[in-house]
Image: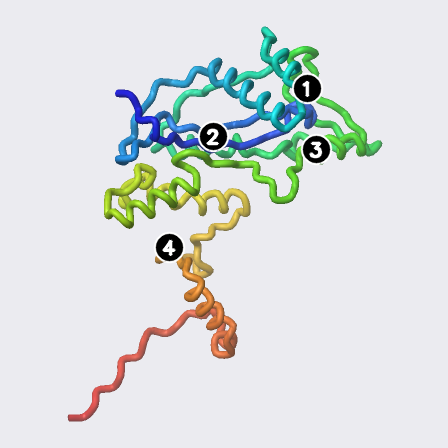
Amino acid sequence: MAAPTSAPPGCVVSLQTFGAYGGNWNPHAHALVSDGVFSPEGEFLPLPSLDPSAVMQLFRRLLLERLHQAERLSEAFMRNLLSWTHPGFSAFAGPPVDAGQTQSLESQARYITRPGLSMDALKKQPDGSFTVQTPPDPRTGVTSITLDALEWIHRIVGHIPDPGQHTRRSYGAYSNRSRVSARVAQESSGSAAHPCQDDEDSEFIRERRRTWARLLRKIFEVDPMLCSCGAEMKIISIITEPRVVDRILRHLQSEHCRARDPFQCRPPPQRAAARPQ
């Protein structure tokens, strides 16, 4: 069945500028793309696998046309680049990952958002230079590169994004605008939930809610769901209304609240004494 033209796919793109060989400049993009589209009726329509060659050709043409519009390339030079037999671009499509395979999805997401260099691969030499361990160079077979301090700084700062620049972008059904529009339409019409919003009681949804805590535990080595008394906590509600948040903060800053240790265990409620009849 053909998908409707208005059906949005889902795509999360991570923009990266670094390569593997000593922080060399290698701009590219990693993307997690839905293996189908979401229809306006809330149905997920699987599609055939992507053709990497067609994706590469489309990306090359759109990028060169964008550079021409920005007056970075002349039209003649753009046409010349488009006529090359070896375009200089490449695209790769990996195997699909099922939505329920949360560990595999997390592994893919961590890979596409990884930093430019692992600190374990960097070693400072006695003379002040730095040696970077790299994968084997396909041309020379070299597995390391040594740089002086200034050259190392020059290479690594080129990959730091400018202030306010986004390095991850979400498109289609995964974008913020699409999710907000779907939620507003659902609330106004009372229709079924958007396909991105699975059953609230499903195992996938429960596992997805625990992902943020697992990531914090891996990065900061602190379990945010563990109380100071050792008991496991659970999320009761998420407060987003500013008026309620301000009221809670005012209470925490009050004299009555500051005089008591917030982590002190409270005694059980006292039952009022029975009144004589």
Closest to the camera, between mark 1 and mark 2, is 2
Within 10 angstroms of label 3, few (less than 14), some, or many (20 or more) residues? some
Return the residue at label 2: 108
Residue nearest the observer in this picture, 261 or 78 = 78
Query: Is mark 2 in CB contact (under 8 Å) with mark 4?
Result: no
**What amino acid type should be assigned to the residue bearing mark 4?**
Ile
What's the CA distance linking mark 1 and mark 2?
25 Å
First in sequence: mark 4 vs mark 1: 1
Within 10 angstroms of label 4, few (less than 14), some, or many (20 or more) residues? few
Extreme top residue here? 85
What's the CA distance linking mark 3 and mark 2?
25 Å
- Image-quadrant location for residue 42: top left
Residue 156, can we see it? yes
Query: Is mark 3 in CB contact (under 8 Å) with mark 1?
Result: no
- Say whether residue 199 is left or right of residue 134: left
Query: Is mark 1 in CB contact (under 8 Å) with mark 2?
Result: no
**Quarter of the image containing the C terminus?**
bottom left
Check disc 4 and report its element: helix, strand or loop: loop
First in sequence: mark 3 vs mark 1: 1
Return the residue at label 1: 143
First in sequence: mark 3 vs mark 4: 3
Q: Residue at x 38, y 45 (%)?
A: 180
Extreme right residue here? 127
Return the residue at label 4: 235
Closest to the camera, between mark 4 and mark 1, is 4
**What amino acid type should be assigned to the residue bearing mark 1?**
Thr
